[in-house]
Amino acid sequence: MSERQKVWVSQPLFDDIVARLHDHFDVVQVPEVSEHDSATIAAALRDVDGALVTLNERVGAKEIAEASKLRAVANVGVGYNNLDVAALHARGIVATNTPDVLTETTADFGFALMMAAARRVTEAERHLRAGKWQGWNFKGLLGADLHGSTLGILGMGRIGQGIARRASGFDMRVLYHNRTRLPADIERDCRAEYVDFDMLFARADHLVLVLPYSAENHHIVDAAALAKMQPTATLTNIARGGIVDETALADALANGRLASAALDVFEGEPTVNPRLLALDNIVLTPHIASGSLATRRAMVDLAVDNLIAALGAGPDAGHPPTPISTGTKDAKRPGTA
Ligand code: GLV
């Protein structure tokens, strides 16, 4: 009988779903939520055939240098900037992610954050909880409307399209910018109009960022981009922290260049820039856009399927793995975040 393959599961996930891995592999399960440094990840990968990792684990050339048996890394997440996919591919290691299953949940949350920023929901709650509410105030905490306003979407992949479809119910005009313009039927379905980057920033009353992070779009939303926005506008980021220059954003929010913002993602997660924490006109959430119970379970389910399939371990994979391919990823999935 051939030796069973071995896999590493980097964090506690859902035991009943991860249990499916035990049918095929010897599983090394990390028992507690843990912060793994590079050396720990390298040590964990040294002796395994596959790994199920989360966005918190960086897997690159250094971490796989001694992982001679490693053949597959299944990421629990649609974004995969924690993986050096080129380095994995160079070693013939399959990398997979979890697209689709989180699209609608993440679009819901993007919408929720945008609404919270526009209508100052968390600021108003802090005001009330601090005992500052003196009674109904005609001019207190006035916000901006969503209905009838212009929504701007930067990154029009599946999640961006989900947000655009929701905007129809609010009678919003939808503008988008993307590396690749969408086919006409999808534009029609989303009731979305393609504009260039500058126009998107200038015209949006509410701008939502849903593009995948890459070295090329690091700080694409910088002081110059923010300066193009209307001072009454809001900015929501559910993509990755590195897309926004947080210092420039803090300046814009502090000096009235921008009305408000909402961030679910941060450059130095889990550390949040203290200047952002000190501002009232910003909604801050701890990277939970895909965090409904059903969706987080579906993500783990898909990642488990991916690992089983990528390691060729069985018919119960159910479907082929969802491999990440470099080079074409932005063209194929321009807005997945
Ligand atoms: C969450 O941020 C994800 O990429 O799945």
Image (cartoon, rainbow, N blue to C red):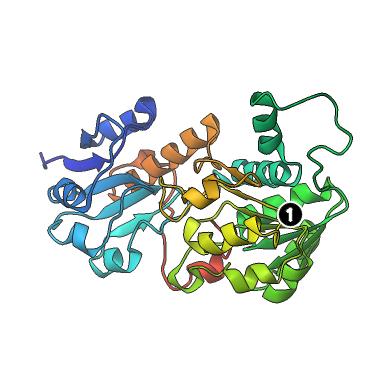
Q: Position of residue 168 (x, y in %)?
A: 82, 50
Q: Which of 71 and 239 is in front in this view?
A: 239
Identified at 79% across, 67% down, the residue is: 203
Task: Look at the image and tell me in which quarter the N terminus lies.
Answer: top left
Marks counted in the figure total 1
Place residue 318 in its image quadrant. top left
Relative to 263, is 11 above or below?
A: above
Q: Nearer the viewer, residue 96 or 283?
A: 283
Identified at 27% across, 49% down, the residue is: 311
Place residue 198 in its image quadrant. bottom right
Q: Position of residue 292 (x, y in %)?
A: 55, 33
* Amino acid type indicated by mark 1: Ala
For disc 1, the neighbor class at 10 Å (few under 14, some 14 to 19, many from 20) is many
Q: What residue would you read off at disc 1?
A: 164
Q: Element at badge 1?
A: helix
Q: Can see residue 145?
A: yes
Left or right, residue 144 beside residue 248: right
Q: Can see residue 212?
A: no
Identified at 26% across, 31% down, the residue is: 22
